């Protein structure tokens, strides 16, 4: 196993200008792991209720994702999220969140998970992220995501966690909110003081910015004719990114840039359909082709 | 003279989170021509009142910008714009617009202006843009900007004009509004049907997208610690773009990409200070340096 991810596994109900989906497979750990599975082997730490169908577990296993760390609570209900997107697809309007089995979740890592080299703490309660972090032995790279809900509700726990995080991947508005800075460059500097050495700021349809020391890398998003459902795009971005880093084992600035483009590639596929419909049936040549399109999209002169 | 520009010459009063400026030099033709003047020789077609100080004319002439086409109306007042930016510096809130001498302006091109190779119709009433277009003989490239005000108030005149325009440079929201399409790719396709062969969509701090046939080029904006005053950034972008095209005489897709980066370079300098304070005292090595930084900012792998 190359990458361990803790995060949510959920049923999503989503409405976009293009249609709606009811109780479909979602969750930060799910999107992350399926995206990363095209590059590396994964293990997932999460919890579901006994309403979680076997076919979803089979899909994950089929994609080489270990579910030994996925607990099932008998008589419990799986986490549910309900949201709506208007024409500004950068903004998710949360209509309902039911933590269900996540409210009492105590992550317990299977022994073989503890030696993992790449750890991703996907968006979930920072206390759960911390419990997983405390159970791994000495990963080569610790990366983390979060959301405004935790920045507002559990910022002390989040800041404690960040002391041990090297690579931090969050949305633009969240970076500004956490740092209390309108300027992203200033926000990055403040976030570096909290622990992370590299900050990747996700900007939805505008791409991503990586801040690392004094260096900045700007990656576009892939221009799509229609964005069908943006749910999970940020998790797929992180999945492609971590997957490529784990596959290559190269954490240099130059390679993180490529990893960001692979992340953007995976995110761009994901938004083409509801749930994991597009993502789970990708081919490697589709991924390589879109990566090459990113080169053509941004190229203006060789360095 | 390489480039002819028609547009506004104005006094701006601007408030941003960083300060305010009263009745400072502004206007689309002013910003455009000063930005382009680092690459090519320009002539300006516009009108001012007798309240327009000689020092501004001298500054333009010092930058090799011909003001033979700049009419002065005795007893008239120069165009005035008053606006405010909040923390979202992508949105200008117009507080007051006084067209003044522009309400009766009849552009009359000096004979030596009519043979110009590169024509830029900066943001101004599309009827004035049309009158200038009708007086030039056969320019190599006709490019144009506009704004939501004309899209809403004079769309028929604007559409008539666009039939003769090759390169169209507008804001993201304006492209969507003109085409009546939320998807930029679909909007570009509809705008191609109106006349232009190339569409450049300005996205403020998110950079620019070029649509040309089936090709898309994505350019970032230069990440600045603080954006002091965004007024004129779009005009400076167009100025750098047209200036570089006129300087090189190369209208290939590959060269337009470079020109867009020069445009972004000029826009990034402009927003560092009020009015043209930063722009008018740039050096060529500062421009080259920032252009090189754009390469480092976007580079992830050679094509």
Image (cartoon, coloured by chain):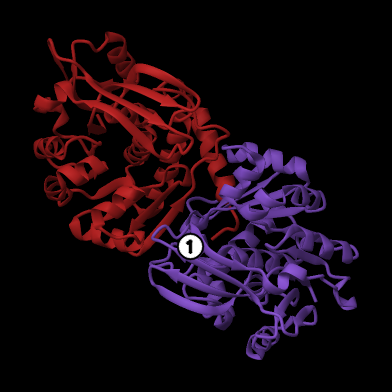
Chain colours: A red, B purple
In depth, the one of B153 and A45 nearer the eye is B153
From the top left corner, tell me how far across and down residue A106 is, in percent: 8, 27
Against B181, residue B112 (above or below) is: below
Q: Chain of mark 1?
A: B
Q: Which quarter of the figure has residue B44?
A: bottom right
From the top left corner, tell me how far across and down residue B228 is, in percent: 43, 70
In depth, the one of A227 and A141 nearer the eye is A227
Q: Which quarter of the figure has residue A224?
A: top right
State left or right for residue B137 relative to residue B273: right
According to the picture, the residue beneath numbered tag 1 turns out to be B222
* Circle 1: element type: loop
In depth, the one of A35 and A159 nearer the eye is A159
State left or right for residue A61 relative to residue B191: left
Q: Residues within 10 Å of mark 1 (few under 14, many from 20)?
A: many
The quadrant of the image that shows the N terminus of chain A is: top left
Does the image show residue B154?
A: yes
Against B189, residue A98 (above or below) is: above
State left or right for residue B126 relative to residue A195: right
What residue sits 30% from the left and 54% below the top?
A176
From the top left corner, tell me how far across and down residue B6 is, in percent: 74, 68
From the top left corner, tell me how far across and down residue B271 is, in percent: 49, 69
What residue sits 15% from the left and 27% below the top?
A112
Number of marks in picture: 1
Against B72, residue A266 (above or below) is: above
What residue sits 72% from the left and 64% below the top?
B245
Does the image show residue B265?
A: no
State left or right for residue A177 relative to residue B116: left
Residue lying at the far front in this picture: please name it: B75
What residue sits 49% from the left and 35% below the top?
A87
Against A186, residue A263 (above or below) is: above
């Amino acid at each position: 196993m190359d990458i361990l991810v803790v995060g949510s596994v959920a049923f999503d109900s989503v409405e976009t200008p293009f249609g709606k989906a009811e109780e479909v497979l979602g969750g930060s750990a799910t999107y992350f792991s399926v995206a990363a599975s095209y590059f590396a082997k994964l293990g997932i730490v999460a919890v579901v209720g006994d309403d979680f169908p076997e076919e979803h577990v089979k899909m994950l296993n089929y994609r080489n994702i270990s579910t030994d760390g996925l607990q099932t609570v008998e008589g419990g209900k799986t986490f549910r999220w309900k949201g709506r997107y208007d024409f500004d697809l950068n903004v998710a309007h949360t209509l309902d969140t039911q933590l269900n089995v996540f409210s009492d979740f105590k992550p317990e890592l299977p022994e073989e998970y503890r030696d993992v080299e790449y750890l991703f703490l996907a968006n979930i309660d920072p206390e759960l992220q911390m419990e997983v972090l405390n159970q791994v032995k000495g990963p080569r790279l610790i990366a983390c995501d979060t959301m405004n809900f935790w920045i507002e509700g559990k910022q002390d726990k989040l800041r404690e966690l960040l002391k041990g995080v090297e690579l931090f991947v969050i949305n633009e508005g969240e970076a500004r909110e956490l740092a209390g800075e309108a300027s992203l460059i200033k926000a990055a500097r403040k976030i570096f003081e909290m622990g992370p050495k590299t900050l990747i700021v996700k900007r939805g349809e505008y791409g991503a910015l990586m801040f690392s020391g004094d260096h900045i890398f700007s990656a576009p998003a892939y221009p799509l004719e229609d964005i069908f459902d943006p749910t999970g795009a940020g998790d797929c971005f992180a999945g492609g990114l971590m997957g490529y880093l784990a596959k290559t084992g190269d954490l240099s600035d130059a390679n993180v840039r490529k990893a960001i483009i692979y992340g953007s590639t995976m995110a761009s596929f994901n938004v083409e359909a509801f749930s994991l419909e597009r993502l789970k049936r990708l081919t490697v040549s589709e991924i390589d082709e879109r990566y090459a399109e990113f080169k053509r999209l941004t190229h203006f002169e060789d360095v």
